Image (spheres, grey):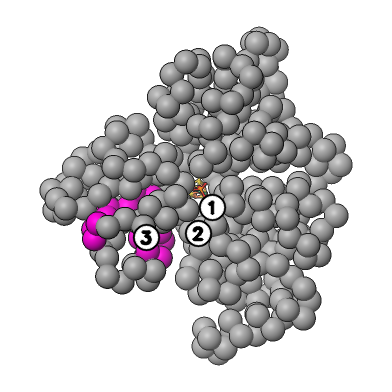
């Protein structure tokens, strides 16, 4: 069967069963073409809250499917590929945070949404790459523990200098691969190009940027800009998608290493099997986790 035929079958199946398909912007083009909603972590979490479909399939990684379940506990939520996890989400465990809170009762704990549901239960508020700066500014606390991404945390600390931000040793192994030397080299090769970067990259890389933002913000900036050339400092799927969206512009991925193997695990066939009941993983969370993790995400939605 070719791609178009499989897409047609998936579309028929999802309509028949009233299933909503969510896809992160890093997913393959053929999945994004038939998803009901494509976006960054924040956009997906809002969609998860608002959709009235009874079943939701997430094409992304586990923490994203957990977020959907936390916000819609009565719905059937599935992750299209059961092996798609985010290594950053697993880096810090609940006990480390509980110990920190006991020793530092004056701190508020801010969790990047790329964390497990279990970790969210002991954090005060979630943030995404697009909401982090705004939420930390609004948060009623001077001292903040920001976890797990120390690169995003450093960026927030720089943008909100009046707060004390304590970091832990975590981060995205994919974005951390990009070096300042690679960016400098790419800038020499394409002197007219603007450099657009995700804040999960290292501070010395982010410092070289013309624009810093989430995956959606990077894409919106590039589409609206009058410029014709862009260096893309995030997962390479974004440069590929932008090339389709704006064929009159040029988008250069900076490093061949910027490929997230977890985001690339989900195939159109996985999605088809999830819809037909032969694949995917049903997300199950116990009631205590649902209730406590939900407070953390609701706080983000309220502040964001
Ligand atoms: P955003 O979707 O928030 O930009 O995050 C990027 C990412 O790495 C998701 O896993
Ligand atoms: Fe996790 Fe990084 Fe992959 Fe996003 S790109 S899923 S943060 S490892």
Residue 233 among magenta residues? yes
Judged left or right of residue 22, residue 52 is right
The dot on residue 25 is 2
- How far, Cα to Cα, is label 2 from label 1? 6 Å
Highlighted range, magenta = 227-242
Query: In the drawing, what numbered circle is on residue 148?
Result: none
Whether the residue carrying mark 2 lies under 8 Å from ligand 1 is answered with yes
* 10 Å crowding of disc 1: few (<14), some (14-19), many (20+): some
* Contact, mark 1 vs mark 3 (Cβ under 8 Å): no
Residue 252 % position (x, y): 27, 58
Q: Is residue 89 visible?
A: no
Q: CA distance from mark 1 to mark 3?
A: 16 Å
Residue at the image position 61 percent from the left and 38 percent from the top: 304
The quarter in which the N terminus is drawn is: bottom right
Which residue is nearer to you in this view: 123 or 169?
123
Relative depth, front residue between 240 and 219 = 219
Q: Report helix, strand or loop for mark 3.
A: helix
Crowd around label 2: few <14 · some 14–19 · many ≥20 (10 Å):
many
Q: Is mark 1 within 8 Å of ligand 1?
A: yes
Please provide percent x and percent y for residue 57.
Answer: 69, 64
Q: Is 51 placed left or right of 61 in the picture?
A: right
Label 1 sits on residue: 40
Which residue corresponds to the image point at 31% horizontal and 55% vertical from the top-left? 225
- Residue holding disc 3: 223
- Residue 248 pos. (x, y %): 27, 70
- For the question of whether residue 214 can be seen, the reply is yes
Determine crowd level at label 3: few under 14, some 14-19, many 20+ residues with C-alpha closer than 10 A.
Answer: some
209 or 122, nearer to the observer:
209
Name the residue rendered at 60%, 69% in the picture.
Answer: 35
């Amino acid at each position: 069967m070719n791609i178009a035929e499989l897409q047609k079958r998936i579309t028929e199946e999802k309509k028949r069963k009233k299933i909503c398909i969510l896809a992160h912007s890093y997913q393959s083009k053929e999945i994004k073409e038939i998803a009901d909603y494509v976006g960054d972590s924040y956009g997906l979490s809002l969609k998860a809250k608002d959709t009235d479909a009874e079943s939701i399939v997430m094409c992304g990684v586990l923490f994203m499917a957990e977020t959907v379940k936390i916000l819609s506990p009565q719905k059937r939520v599935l992750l299209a590929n059961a092996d798609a996890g985010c290594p950053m989400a697993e880096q810090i465990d609940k006990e480390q945070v509980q110990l920190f809170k006991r020793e530092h009762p004056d701190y508020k704990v801010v969790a990047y949404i790329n964390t497990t549901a279990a970790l969210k239960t002991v954090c005060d508020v979630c943030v995404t790459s697009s909401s982090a700066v705004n939420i930390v500014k609004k948060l009623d606390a001077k001292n903040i523990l920001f976890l797990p991404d120390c690169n995003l945390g450093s960026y927030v600390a720089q943008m909100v200098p009046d707060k004390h931000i304590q970091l832990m040793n975590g981060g995205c192994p994919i974005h951390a691969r990009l070096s300042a030397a690679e960016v400098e080299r790419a800038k020499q090769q394409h002197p007219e190009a603007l450099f657009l970067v995700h804040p999960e990259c290292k501070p010395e890389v982010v410092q070289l940027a013309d624009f810093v933002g989430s995956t959606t913000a990077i894409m919106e900036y590039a589409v609206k800009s009058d410029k014709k050339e862009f260096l893309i400092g995030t997962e390479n799927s974004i440069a590929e998608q932008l090339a389709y969206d704006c064929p009159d512009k040029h988008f250069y991925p900076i490093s061949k290493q910027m490929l997230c193997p977890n985001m690339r695990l989900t195939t159109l066939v996985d999605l088809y099997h999830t819809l037909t009941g032969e694949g995917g993983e049903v997300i199950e969370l116990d009631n205590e986790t649902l209730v406590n993790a939900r407070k953390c995400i609701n706080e983000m939605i309220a502040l964001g």
